[in-house]
């Protein structure tokens, strides 16, 4: 795999993985937990599958960039993006548990 292909995998993968992960918690609170707009469940029914699909393809692209040889800067950045994604998933789980406990 060439440097340009791995660079493209990193750029698309990090954007497709991190942006939906950051958008999930506010969207869940606004559309499911405290619906503030009319037809929030309809919007949630369309938004959450789109977020899940984007997240899947982003993680898939990041993993493809991580396992490519040799280990260089792009591999390190892909691992870093996956670590950031792990931190986002952790705080999302903690906040969802706190919201569920308040109910």
Image (tube, grey):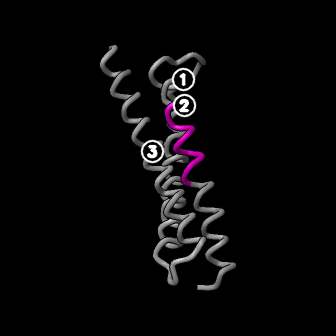
Q: Residue at x 54, y 53 (%)?
A: 17
C-alpha distance separating marks 3 and 2:
18 Å
Instruction: Evaluate if marks 2 and 1 touch, with contact meaning CB atoms under 8 Å apart.
Output: yes
Residue 35 in picture, x, y percent from top left: 52, 18
Relative to 15, does residue 61 appear above or below in the rendering? below
Let me know if residue 19 is in the magenta part. Answer: yes
- Report the span colored magenta: 17-26
**Rendered image: mark on residue 30:** 1
The answer to which of marks 1 and 3 sits earlier in the sequence is 1
Q: Give the class, few, some or many, for how many residues have Cα within 10 Å of label 3's Cα (few <14, many ≥20).
A: few
Residue 63 in picture, x, y percent from top left: 47, 68
Residue 1 location, quadrant: bottom right
Q: Which residue is mark 2?
A: 27
Callout 2 secondary element: helix
Q: Residue at x 49, y 63 (%)?
A: 79
Relative to 49, does residue 91 appear above or below in the rendering? above
Q: Is residue 77 left or right of residue 60?
A: right
Residue 90 in picture, x, y percent from top left: 39, 40
Q: Which residue is mark 3?
A: 87
Let me know if residue 23 is in the magenta part. Answer: yes
C-alpha distance separating marks 2 and 1:
5 Å
Callout 3 secondary element: helix
């Amino acid at each position: 795999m060439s440097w340009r292909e791995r660079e493209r995998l990193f750029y698309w993968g990090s954007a497709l993985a991190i942006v939906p992960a950051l958008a999930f918690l506010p969207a869940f609170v606004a559309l499911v937990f405290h619906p503030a707009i009319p037809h929030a469940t309809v919007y949630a029914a369309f938004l959450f599958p789109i977020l899940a699909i984007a997240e899947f393809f982003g993680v898939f692209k990041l993993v493809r960039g991580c396992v490519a040889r040799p280990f260089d800067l792009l591999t390190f950045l892909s691992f870093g993006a996956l670590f950031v994604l792990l931190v986002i998933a952790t705080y999302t789980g903690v906040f969802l548990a706190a919201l569920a406990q308040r109910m």
